[in-house]
């Protein structure tokens, strides 16, 4: 590809499969229209979701802590020869 053909390629319209850039005003209008479509959870749903996530995180923390403690003791006993 020569320099002239590369330079002229950037001045053409969008290629097949590419979309044309939108202006800031159009972007803002489309963003506001999409935000109007969002369905926000009720307070009851939000509390339920928060509780489920909190319980899940606490359970996972407990599992990882127990595994860390067990593997730590195992490795310590292997390298020191002391059974605890």
Image: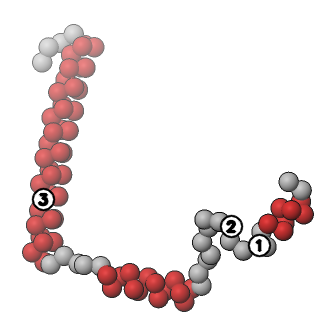
- Identify the residue at horizontal 79%, vertical 66% (top origin): 9
Name the secondary structure under disc 1: loop
Residue picked out by circle 1 = 12
Question: Toward which corner of the image does residue 25 lie, by quadrant?
Answer: bottom right
The earlier-in-sequence mark between 3 and 1 is 1
- Identify the residue at horizontal 12%, vertical 59% (top origin): 52
Residue picked out by circle 3 = 52
Name the secondary structure under disc 3: helix
Residue picked out by circle 2 = 15
**In front: label 2 or label 3:** 2
Report how far apart the C-alphas of labels 3 and 1 lie in the structure.
Answer: 53 Å
Task: Decide: is 27 above or below 66.
Answer: below
Question: Toward which corner of the image does residue 21 lie, by quadrant?
Answer: bottom right
Question: Label 1 near label 2: C-beta < 8 Å?
Answer: yes
- Identify the residue at horizontal 15%, vertical 65% (top origin): 49
Give the quarter of the figure containing the N terminus: bottom right
């Amino acid at each position: 590809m020569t320099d002239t053909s590369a330079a002229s390629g950037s001045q053409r319209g969008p290629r097949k499969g590419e979309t044309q850039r939108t202006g800031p005003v159009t972007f803002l209008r489309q963003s506001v229209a999409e935000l109007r479509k969002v369905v926000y959870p009720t307070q009851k749903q939000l509390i339920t979701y928060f509780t489920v996530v909190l319980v899940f995180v606490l359970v996972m923390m407990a599992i990882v802590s127990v595994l860390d403690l067990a593997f730590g003791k195992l490795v310590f006993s292997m390298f020191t020869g002391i059974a605890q």
